[in-house]
Amino acid sequence: MNSVAPGTKRAAAEVIDAAGGRYVDVAVMAPVRPKCMDVPLLISGPHAEAGREALAGLGFTASRAVGDEVGRASTIKMLRSVMYKGVEALTAECLIACERAGVTEEVLSSFGNDWATGADYRFDRMLVHGLRRAAELREAGKTLEGLGLPPAMSSGTADWQQRLGSLEISPVPEGLPAKLTAIAASDAFCSPSAPMAQI
């Protein structure tokens, strides 16, 4: 149950199979909290159904087999993360720039609906889990490369997740304005020209 590229899962499966074990590829498809044992799981590989039954026996209520190929579940997870975590990174890039330019409210209101609430949630996820998510996006990049595609957006997403997670803002303040203020006050964002590689 980890977020790695399908090739990484297949390499692990070879080692486990050679030792006489039974490997299943399990992808966790939502935050574990608050769902806990009800978190949705995708399972693939030759032993997927047996794995699903074993997880159900442990109390997992929302697992589903998605194929008999090791790597299929992780491929679904990785490619989904390209979109979900990418939207988070775009939110960070847009709103941190808006804050510097003094146009945050105008830009947020132009999106319509209650876009600020979603943005607040995305910043919360990045500030708390950014380092882990950066590692996941690097694995998503490997997934894309394995499909013959350049991971241009995923590389940028990994940079933003790394940058936000590295700030170590704790506790994370409540509300979008407070989060943007805390980010602006951190040393990592003091210089407009600070390169990502330094973070």
Image (tube, grey):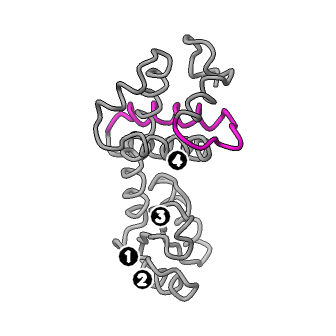
Kindly identify which residue carries mark 3. 27
Q: Is residue 75 magenta?
A: no
Q: Residue at x 42, y 45 (%)?
A: 118
Kindly identify which residue carries mark 1. 65
SS state under label 3: strand
Q: Position of residue 134 (x, y in %)?
A: 55, 41
Kindly identify which residue carries mark 2. 49
SS state under label 4: helix
Up the image or down, 41 lies above or below 49; here it is above
As rendered, which of 108 and 58 lies closer to the eye?
108
Quarter of the image with the C terminus is top right
What's the distance in space between the residues labelled 1 and 2, CA to CA? 6 Å
Q: Residues within 10 Å of mark 3 (few under 14, many from 20)?
A: many
Q: Position of residue 39 (x, y in %)?
A: 49, 70
Kindly identify which residue carries mark 4. 136
What's the distance in space between the residues labelled 3 and 1, CA to CA? 10 Å
Tell me which corner region of the image, top left, top right, bottom left or bottom right, holds residue 88: top left
Residue stretch in magenta: 149-176
